[in-house]
């Protein structure tokens, strides 16, 4: 079944893309969650015009994110947390906390799905954190220090 995506769907496509999916996936998941609509002739024409507009915006956004990745690769993000007597953090550092530290210290704003932290950081030290956006890949260092 051909559907038109109304929102970006990971590993499937961007908003206004016409994609071929199984009938069950479209009927039971995409359409009820308002992630897609059936691809009728008139809907495809509307989607094509909207896609042309959003493509230019997406290209500008991708360019900005590439610049942010370059800036971030040169940056060192420091997060200070309370630790116990064994040197472990009382609470783990996850993606939201890393994103807010990036925003404060490097003055870079990234979408939350670009930071690919395998597991939360639970101890003091220096960690390489990968950032993936489309085909662009980068890494930056997060230094976790004990709070005095």
Image (cartoon, rainbow, N blue to C red):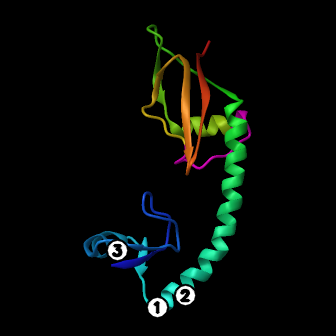
Q: Position of residue 141 (x, y in %)?
A: 61, 26
Q: Is 28 one of the magenta-colored residues?
A: no
User: Per the image, is 110 magenta?
Assistant: yes
Q: Which element type, helix, strand or loop, lies under badge 2? A: helix
Q: Earlier in the sequence, mark 1 or mark 3?
A: 3
Q: Who is closer to the viewer here, 69 or 80?
A: 69
Labelled disc at residue 41: 1
Residue found at the very far left of the displayed protein: 24
Q: Quadrant of the C terminus?
A: top right
Q: Are marks 1 and 2 in contact (CB under 8 Å)?
A: yes
Are the two marked residues, 2 and 3, in contact with CB atoms closer than 8 angstroms? no
Which of pointers 2 and 3 indicates the residue nearer the eye?
Answer: 2
Instruction: Answer with mark 2 or mark 3, whichever residue precedes in sequence.
Output: 3
Query: Which quarter of the image is occupied by the N terminus?
Result: bottom left
Q: What is the C-alpha distance between the residues marked 1 and 2?
A: 7 Å
Which residue is denoted by mark 3 in the rendering?
Answer: 32
Numbered label attached to residue 45: 2
Gap between marks 1 and 3 measured at Cα:
21 Å
Q: Which residues are magenta?
A: 104-114
Distance between the Cα atoms at labels 2 and 3?
Answer: 22 Å
């Amino acid at each position: 079944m051909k559907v038109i995506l109304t929102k970006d769907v990971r590993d499937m496509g961007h908003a206004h893309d016409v994609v071929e999916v199984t009938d069950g996936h479209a009927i039971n998941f995409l359409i009820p969650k308002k992630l897609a609509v059936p691809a009728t002739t008139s809907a495809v024409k509307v989607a094509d015009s909207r896609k042309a507009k959003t493509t230019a915006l997406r290209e500008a956004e991708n360019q900005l994110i590439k610049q942010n990745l370059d800036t971030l690769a040169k940056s060192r993000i420091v997060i200070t947390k309370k630790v116990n007597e064994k040197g472990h953090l009382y609470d783990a550092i996850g993606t939201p906390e890393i994103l807010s530290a990036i925003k404060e210290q490097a003055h870079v704003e990234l979408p939350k799905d670009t930071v690919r932290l395998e597991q939360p950081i639970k101890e003091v030290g220096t960690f390489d954190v990968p950032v993936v956006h489309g085909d662009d890949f980068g890494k930056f260092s997060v230094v976790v220090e004990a709070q005095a």
